[in-house]
Amino acid sequence: MSDRRHPLSDGPDGPDGPDGTEGPDDSRTAHGSHDARAGEETGRGRRSGGAAGRWRRFKDSPFLPAAVLSLLIAAAAGLFAGSYTYAMADPTPRRIPMAVVGATGDASVHRERAQAFAAAIGEDLRSSLELREYPTAAAADEALESQRVFAVLRIPGDPADPGRERPVLEVSSASGASVAELLTEAARSVGEETGLRVAVRDAKPLDPGDPRGLALFYVTLAAVVTGFIGAIQMSVHARDLNPAERITFTAAYSLLGGFAIAAAVDWLLDAVDFPFVHSWAILALTMFTSGMVFTMFQALIGRWAMLPTWGLMVLIGNPSSGGAVSWPLLPSPLGTIGRWLPPGASVNAQHTAVYFPGYLHVQPYLVLAGWAVASCAVFWILRHRHPGGRDGGS
């Protein structure tokens, strides 16, 4: 029977045999060295790959988007507070257009008295008034109604008898409650300091149910916010809607929502006497525009669409709308930008419809319609990126 040995066993032909290979002790030493080197390499691999592995696991987990959202929400909160504080905390008039009219008398005296009053009130307000002279009281009234001016200063007609009639400052709370309030306070303060007594009256008061003139700002804010929140909920809970159906249902909830807002403020609370159908149409168009702006951004950048929507409509659009603080009192960049954004256009259209129905301006309606059409067009062009839909849908 042949003598068969295990290759690692001792013996003449084994590892310690005459062929000069290593003996058992040397073999264990060699294997120990190999294991040590392997252990060191494994340790280095663990040390070098540990951080990368943890990052990969974190990146693929729900913790990464949650952490990013936490930071973004915190930043949005600070920006939200900062934008409203910047626009509204300390409203300072930059330039307020005012009509000046005198029935008869010396034009040079007329101008001198008006300029003296304007200089005094402008110094009190830390700004300057933009005086616009009108030949007749009717022309000045028309300028006030068409919102080309915020107030009318009526100078007594006979300079030889200044005590016969005091100058009258007619403000328009409907044009801008904050501007009217500042002008009223400044006129009384200037009168006490200079002896130039000026009677102040409100030519266009606000509705009794809205003495601060904030109702139109709030109804617009409600339409803007619920408009894009509705679009967000549609994208989450009605993902199977095709693009055309998405636009249709956005229009549907906008019509219903606009009716609900107008009915609550007018019929239920009696805060503002809306021209109901007109105001309803403005609110519905505002909601639809806001919803389609979000839908457009969703097609463009996907799940982060809320960021530009929030920035455009809330951080910039609402503070610059002129609803809470009139445009002449806003920082000049906001006062200019606000007119061309949906919230500002909506406030402007609603404000004119309620208080100046005989002097409607087409600009705010064109702004709202332009944003709505542009958003629908971008969404339709990029409808293949619509996050949802059904097979075979358009």
Image: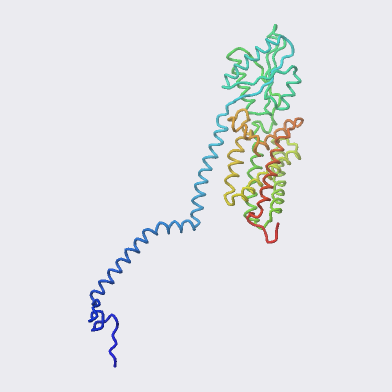
**Image quarter in which the N terminus is found:** bottom left
Coordinates of residue 206 in the picture (x, y in percent): 69, 30
Q: Is residue 304 left or right of residue 63?
A: right
Q: Which quadrant of the figure has residue 17?
A: bottom left
Q: Is residue 165 above or below residue 66?
A: above
Q: How many marks?
A: 0
Looking at the picture, does residue 289 appear above or below residue 47? above
Taking the spot 65% from the left edge, 12% from the top edge, the residue there is 113
In the image: residue 313, left or right of residue 16? right
Q: In the rendered view, tell whether residue 308 sits above or below residue 143.
A: below
Q: Position of residue 31 (x, y in %)?
A: 28, 72
Q: Which quadrant: the C terminus?
A: bottom right
Residue shown at the point (50%, 50%) measured from the top left:
68
Q: For the point 25% across and 83% down, which residue is it?
A: 13
Query: Which residue is outermost to the top?
Result: 160
Q: Nearer the viewer, residue 312 or 359?
A: 312
Left or right of 144 on screen, residue 30: left
Picture coordinates of residue 263, whole percent (x, y): 72, 42
Residue sitting at 62 percent across and 28 percent down?
Answer: 328
Q: Residue 262: which quarter of the image?
A: top right
Pick the front one: 222 or 150: 150
* Residue at the bottom extreme, as displayed: 1
What colouring does the structure picture have? rainbow
Residue furthest out toward the front: 19
Q: Position of residue 20 (x, y in %)?
A: 23, 78
Quadrant in which residue 50 is drawn: bottom left
